[in-house]
Image (cartoon, grey):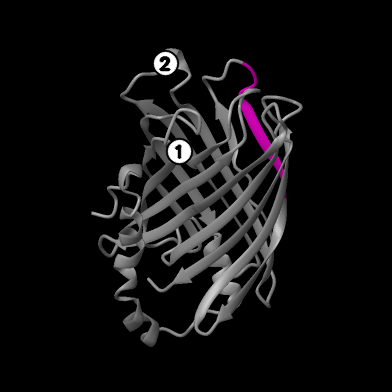
Amino acid sequence: MAIRLSYAACATFPFLVMGPLSNSSSFAQSEPPPSDTEVSKETENPFTRKITLPLRYEADFQYGPTESTKETFEINNAIVPFSLNDDWALITRTKMPLVVQPPKKLGHSWQTGLGNGYTEFFLSPEHGEGLYWGVGPTLYYPSMNSTLGVNRWGSGPAVGFAKQDESPWEFGAVATQIWSTGGPSNGGSNRTNQLMLNPALSYHFDDGWALDSSPTITANWVASGGKWTVPVGGGFSKTFRIGDQPMKLAFDSYYNAIRPVASQQTWLTQVTLTFQFPK
């Protein structure tokens, strides 16, 4: 099944997306196409009933002792909804990063490979009156090696909400706690006990333009020094179409106002291209 994702067989993920897409054409013929503003708002909703595929490039500046740029190419919180019955839906939300990482210590080499990803499985009610919410478990995937992340599986709870209605304002948040399970911890360095908070606030104009802020705040509870990373910033986006396919291009930049090491990982920039498909 599509939800059994693993880094040992990364090709599994396309089935999660392409399965529902195989029947999307019949829905597209019966439903009027959404406006650019509606598409823009739906892509910001973590509990949307639309299939959403965001592809992101992220540059983290001043990473490590060499103060080089860490680059990440990722599927960033791709959403696939499944209708369970008239009252409930299962919303899957998946991140899978490919990382190009500078040395963590002087004299070490660069590393390229798959970092830690995850899939959140939200149980969400079908009737919301503009207020969406969901709760469920998270499956955390091991990195390719312990340099690129934690080379162990993990799990934990996730909960979130989103307010989306006729107003141009949209806001929400998702909180996820991860604990690693199984495998050697190597004295504690190869284990996960991490909180991720993803608040989101956006304002949508009538022509598909939008302003947004959606930082990922993390707390690494097993870190020996500073535990929190708190980015501050935001960006803008434009929704457009190529043929009948709606897409959204977003540019965001954040300053890590709170970070474990004061001289490192000061800024990050993100470029995200999001595709949206019928349910």
Residue displayed at 59% across by 68% down: 248
Report crowding for label 2: few under 14, some 14 to 19, many 20 or more residues within 10 A (C-alpha): few
Q: Position of residue 128 (x, y in %)?
A: 44, 60
Q: Magenta residues?
A: 225-233
Q: Residue at x 57, y 29 (%)?
A: 219
Does residue 143 appear to the left or right of 174 in the view shown? left
How many marks overall? 2
Residue 236 position, x and y percent, is 71, 61
Which of the image's four quarters has the C terminus? Answer: bottom left
- Residue marked by disc 2: 186
Identify the secondary structure beneath mark 2. helix
Residue, disc 1: 116
Give the x, y percent position of residue 81: 36, 61
165 vs 259: above or below: below
Image location (x, y in percent) of residue 251: 68, 59
Q: Main secondary structure of the magenta part?
A: strand
Image position of 173 with respect to 222: above or below: below
| Dot 2 amino acid type | Asn
